Image (cartoon, rainbow, N blue to C red):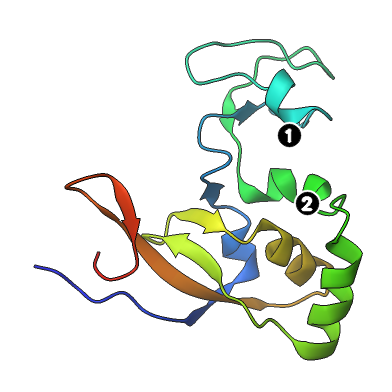
Amino acid sequence: MKTALRPTFLMDVANVITLRGLDTECFFVCENRHVPENLHDCFMWRGNPTMCVVCRQLRMTPMVMNDLLPYKRKSKNYDRLLLDMSARGQKTPIQVIGGAYINNGGHRIAVAVDLGWDTILCTENGWDASDNSLTTSTR
């Protein structure tokens, strides 16, 4: 049975930052949540354990959106987005897949955290099992 996806809804920011992102899917961090500066060169891929470059622990914990926030804040357009969302609110929802993953919206999540928002506007996406494509029409 196909169910229509929600076009927009509010989600608690505290819950959003604990979700995996599609850009974190294969990355792990150590128990101290250290995230190396050069994220894509330093992180391990699933099944290939390496030591944390900061504290030398094995990276065992899957990375979540909260781990990426310091790097989202370093984006060249972050300050402009922060000012815009502070003045006008959130105009573009973040994309949530099946209530379990973030597809797009890391910078907006960082802004919501920095502004102390309790909720963030989301839209729901899903996967089309027939060809593994992202769809916004069915779940």
Residue 88 in which image quadrant: bottom right
Percent coordinates x, y for residue 137 in the rendering? 28, 71
User: Could you tell whether 24 is left or right of 133 in the image?
Assistant: right
Q: Mark 2 points at which residue?
A: 72
Foreground disc of the pair 1, 2: 2
User: Looking at this view, is 12 or 68 the one in front?
Assistant: 68
Q: Name the residue under label 1.
A: 33
Percent coordinates x, y for residue 61 in the rendering? 59, 30
Percent coordinates x, y for residue 34 in the rendering? 78, 30
What kind of residue is marked 2? Lys
User: Could you tell whether 45 is left or right of 84 in the image?
Assistant: left
Q: Counting other residues with Cα less than 10 Å from the Cα at mark 2, is it few (<14), some (14-19), or many (20 or more)? A: some
User: Looking at this view, is 84 or 66 the one in front?
Assistant: 84
Circle 2 — which element? helix
Q: In this view, does 138 lie above or below 31?
A: below
Mark drawn on residue 125? none
- Quadrant housing the N terminus: bottom left
Residue drawn at x 88%, y 54% as measured from the top left: 76
Q: Is residue 130 above or below residue 88?
A: above
Circle 1 — which element? loop
Residue 13 in which image quadrant: bottom right
What kind of residue is marked 1? Arg
Residue 64: in sight, yes or no? yes
For the residues bearing labels 1 and 2, Cβ distance under 8 angstroms: no
Q: Is residue 35 above or below residue 123?
A: above
Residue drawn at x 61%, y 18% as measured from the top left: 44
